[in-house]
Each structure stands twice: as C-alpha cells, then as structure tokens.
C-alpha cells in the first residue's frame, strides 16, 4: 500500500528510536513537529513503523540469540555475542529494548490523548498497539511504569506498577479498544491509508485485540498467584465467541530503496540503500543446534523431520554443495571451517521494499491451540496446531504437507494425542515458526515453559539463561527513586509473576 510522502517525512522526524536515551525526552519545539503538534493521521503511521522497528531490531536479535537460533560468524569476527553467551546481564545490556518500546508507545499515547468522535478508530488502534508493545516490557523486565508513564512533561519520574497489575490494565485497554470500534458513530474517520498496517480494516483490528487478550491470558495462566488466577478465570468466557486473527498483520508505509526508507528488517540485517551488506548481515549466522534440528540430521536431539523452511531461513554454506552449516554458540570455529556458514536466508530477506511481518496468523493459531488443549476454549487443538504450521510454511510460499506427514508420530514435535507432549509440540513448533519474526517471543516463551529444552552456549556462566533483564542505565539515572532493585538471583531464577 502507499501513503503520501508527507507521512514519510513525519515518520523520519518522530521515529528516531536510537537517538534518545530517555523515553520521556520529547521534543516540544513548535518549529520541529512532534506528535504533540500533528494530528493522529500523521502520528499513527510513524508510531506503527516505530513499533515494527522496536519489534525486529535489537529486541528480536536478543531473543534469537537467547533462544539458540542465531550465532555469530566466528570465521571473520572475534568476541561477537560474548556478553550474550556468558549471560553478562548489566544495566547497559540491550537497554535499547526498554527505551525503544517506551519511546514509540509514548507516540501511541499521544494519539490516545486526542480521542474524539472523529478520532475514535485512531484511538482504538493506538490502544491495541500500546498493549502489544508494553507486554514485551513486562515480560522482559517485570514491574514497570504504566499508569503514570507517558504523561509528556507532567511526570518525569513515574512510579512503577507491579507486572501483574500492568497485565490487568493492558487487558482493560484492549476491552476499551474493542468497545470503541464497535460503538463508533458515523462521525468516526476511518484511517484508510494512514493505517500502514491494516489499511483501516477495523474488523481485523478487533481480531488482533482479541488475539492479544488471548495472549495475555495464556501467559498469565501460568501464574500461581491466586489473585491473578481469579482474574484469568473470570475472562475466559469473554473469549468464548471471539474471533481471532486469521491473517498476518503486516506493515508497509511505502518502503523504497532509499536511505531511511527501506524496510527496517532489511535495512538492519540485509543491505543498505547502496546495495552493500550491513555489518549485521555479515555477522549473524544460524546456530548449529537450530540448523541441525531443521535438517533432522541426527546430530542434535530431538530428531525431527526435515524442514523445508530451512532454505528460506538460511543461505546454503558456500563450498558445501548445497548444505547448511551454523556455529555452536560459544565455539571458536564451526565444525567444518572449510565450507563456510549459513547466513540470514532469502525467505526473511526478500527486498528493501518487503512488507514487514508484525503479528502472524501463525502465532494466533498456536495460542488458540494451547488454549483449547488446556480446556479454556472449545474447538480442535490438533486442527489449530496443524493450521499454525501450515500458516508458517505459507509465509515462505511452501507447502506443509510433507512436513506434517513426517512429524505425525514424533512425540513432542508432532501431534500424538498426549496432552503433555502435545503442549511441548506447540511450544517447539512456535519456536521454529517465530524464528526471525519475533525472537523476543521465543525467549519469553522458553522462560514461561522451559520448552523447548535448548543447549546452553559453551561459555555460559550460569546453568540457566536469564529470566529477565536489568533496568537500563537511562532509567537508573532518570528515574532513580522509583527503579526497583534487582539482584543477580532474580535475573537467573523465576521472578516475573507468570514464571515458574
């Protein structure tokens, strides 16, 4: 889809995610327009693009390393990913994850603050995206500012809300968004092309809101807290007849092969506007464990079935005769240094103008399958599980028929009518399907479920990957009085309410 060039101008002005260290540092100079002085029709596409950039940038990279899917090219770089492999979690470790999500969510809040009968659809979309973004903050950090955040100059030191209370608040925001859409009057202006994700298809926005409600409940249901369990149990009936996302939410504000206008994933992990490989493209390769698992080579456990998505997710290793090779995380050399390595593949890096995957029907179907399997929703968990895999294959233009036949009797990988093993299969298949699309989700899910059980990097300093991140230095210096103290033991043992 296309939007006016002025939208790209505003997008460039107000989505410089990496340029700010404090999520409350908002430029209010009237000569330099920000979301304070422009309408929601211009703020929305910028905030949507910023949300996508926050999703697939450093947050995605962190998750893909922590979930043992990416490694570094040790044949051409030294000391790459060392902090990640050693689990050296400090206040400077991936602080951009926190900062980027707060920066872009602040833009979304500015849209919400302009709510009116005319802007009601914009408000609803902003609320839905706000929840989408802030769930990552809660799931990666725990307690965080929410009710006092985003006050634009009124409160520079917002209090922290408990992680569980933020979940409850986010669920309420989704309910409000759905209500806004369903009760909109004729005065409501449809965003149309200013909505660079769904083109103003408000029915699909409602489906995304329902899917995010489902995601909150599925994750929160893992909590042993009695109050949270009461809340979760009170909400399942409200999803009994809900429609969930059945197509991908993508984004394309008119990407072009020009500096600052390429798809953010491509621009970060692929090629710049001149056609030169980025440093990230040269550095990131597949982890040996993940590649061998997809190959079903028998060199790693569990042994699955050959997965045709492998050739879309990674390039073949030069000199390998069409084979694929990764790097064991923490190793000094690949197993066979003479044949080269497999880098990010053509199914993820299509072109600088490719539409970005923001939320997939695949994830929606896996969430539904888990909810049905656990008895929270009605339907066929098996059918939803297989549909999710098919959806993932379709994203790469592939058929899932051969693969589904190959895993049909594989416990913990295919559907075998054993509740515990089928739940493990859902989580392992989600881990594969979200590779490259949403690495953080894979990292978060492994902390929720302990599944799939992934080998640690060779130089890991702990017996378990971190369960959470430390608050960033920007927050420690800018909101000192309110930042909770987090100990090393909290980082490496369950400390967020839904973790067990």
Image (cartoon, helix red, strand yellow):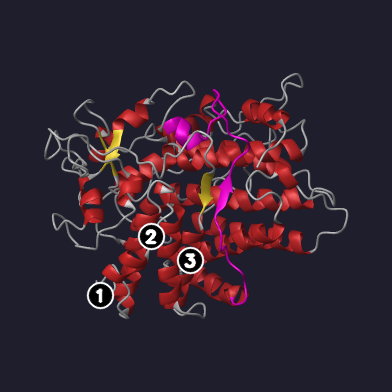
**Residue shown at 65% from the left, 59% from the top:** 204
Q: Is residue 237 visible?
A: yes
The residue at the far right in this view is 187
Residue 249 image point, x, y percent:
57, 52
Secondary structure at numbered mark 2: helix
What is the crowding at mark 2: few (fewer than 14 residues within 10 Å), some, or many (at least 20)? many
Name the image quarter holding residue 282.
top left
Q: Is residue 150 above or below residue 274?
A: below
- Confirm or deny contact between disc 1 and disc 3 (CB under 8 A): no
Q: Earlier in the sequence, mark 2 or mark 1?
A: 1
How much space separates mark 3 and mark 2, taking CA atoms? 10 Å
Residue 65 image point, x, y percent:
31, 43
Q: Earlier in the sequence, mark 3 or mark 2?
A: 3
The residue at the far top in this view is 31
The label on residue 430 is 2
Residue underneath mark 1: 409
Residue 386 image point, x, y percent:
40, 70
Name the image quarter holding residue 12.
top right
- 182 with respect to 356 (left or right): right
The label on residue 365 is 3
- 422 with respect to 172 (left or right): left
Which span of residues is magenta-colored? 240-268
- 85 with respect to 239 (left or right): left
């Amino acid at each position: 889809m296309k939007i006016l060039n002025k939208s790209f101008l505003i997008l460039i002005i107000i989505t410089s995610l990496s340029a700010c260290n404090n999520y409350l540092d908002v430029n209010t100079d009237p000569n330099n327009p920000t979301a304070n002085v422009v309408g929601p029709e211009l703020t929305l596409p910028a905030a949507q693009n910023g949300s996508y950039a926050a999703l697939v940038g450093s947050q995605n990279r962190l998750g893909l390393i922590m979930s043992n899917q990416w490694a570094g090219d040790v044949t051409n770089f030294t000391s790459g990913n060392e902090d990640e492999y050693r689990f050296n979690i400090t206040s400077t470790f991936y602080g951009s994850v926190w900062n980027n999500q707060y920066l872009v969510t602040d833009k979304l809040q500015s849209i919400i603050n302009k709510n009116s009968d005319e802007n009601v659809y914009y408000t609803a979309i902003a609320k839905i995206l706000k929840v989408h973004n802030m769930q990552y903050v809660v799931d990666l950090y725990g307690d965080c500012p929410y009710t006092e955040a985003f006050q634009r100059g009124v409160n520079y030191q917002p209090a922290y809300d408990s992680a569980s209370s933020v979940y409850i608040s986010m669920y309420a925001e989704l309910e409000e968004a759905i209500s806004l859409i369903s009760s909109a009057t004729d005065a409501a202006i449809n965003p149309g092309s200013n909505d660079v994700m769904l083109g103003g298809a408000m029915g699909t926005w409602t489906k995304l809101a329902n899917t995010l409600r489902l995601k909150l409940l599925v994750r929160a249901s893992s909590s042993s807290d009695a109050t949270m369990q009461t809340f979760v149990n009170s909400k399942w009936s409200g999803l009994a007849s809900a429609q969930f996302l059945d197509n991908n939410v993508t984004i394309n504000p008119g990407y072009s092969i020009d500096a600052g206008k390429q798809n953010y994933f491509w621009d970060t992990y692929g090629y710049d506007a001149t056609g030169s490989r980025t440093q990230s493209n040269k550095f990131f390769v597949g982890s040996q464990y993940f590649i061998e698992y997809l190959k079903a080579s028998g060199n790693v456990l569990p042994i699955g079935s050959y997965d045709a998505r492998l050739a879309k997710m990674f390039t073949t290793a030069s000199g390998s005769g069409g084979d694929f090779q990764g790097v064991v995380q923490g190793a000094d050399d690949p197993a066979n240094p003479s044949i080269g390595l497999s880098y990010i593949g053509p199914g993820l890096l299509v072109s600088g103008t490719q539409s970005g995957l923001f939320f997939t029907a695949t994830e929606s179907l896996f969430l539904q399958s888990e909810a049905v399997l656990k008895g929270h929703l009605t339907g066929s968990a098996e059918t939803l599980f297989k549909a999710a895999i098919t959806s993932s294959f379709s994203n790469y233009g592939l058929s899932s028929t051969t693969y589904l036949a190959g895993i049909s009797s594989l416990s913990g990988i295919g559907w075998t009518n054993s509740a515990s093993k089928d739940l493990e299969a859902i989580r392992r298949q989600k881990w594969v399907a979200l590779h490259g699309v949403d690495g953080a989700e894979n990292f978060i899910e492994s902390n929720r479920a302990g599944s799939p059980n992934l080998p640690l990097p060779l130089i890991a300093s702990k017996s378990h990957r971190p369960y959470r991140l430390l608050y960033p230095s920007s927050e420690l210096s800018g909101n000192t009085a309110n930042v909770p103290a987090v100990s090393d033991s909290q980082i490496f043992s369950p400390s967020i309410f839904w973790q067990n």
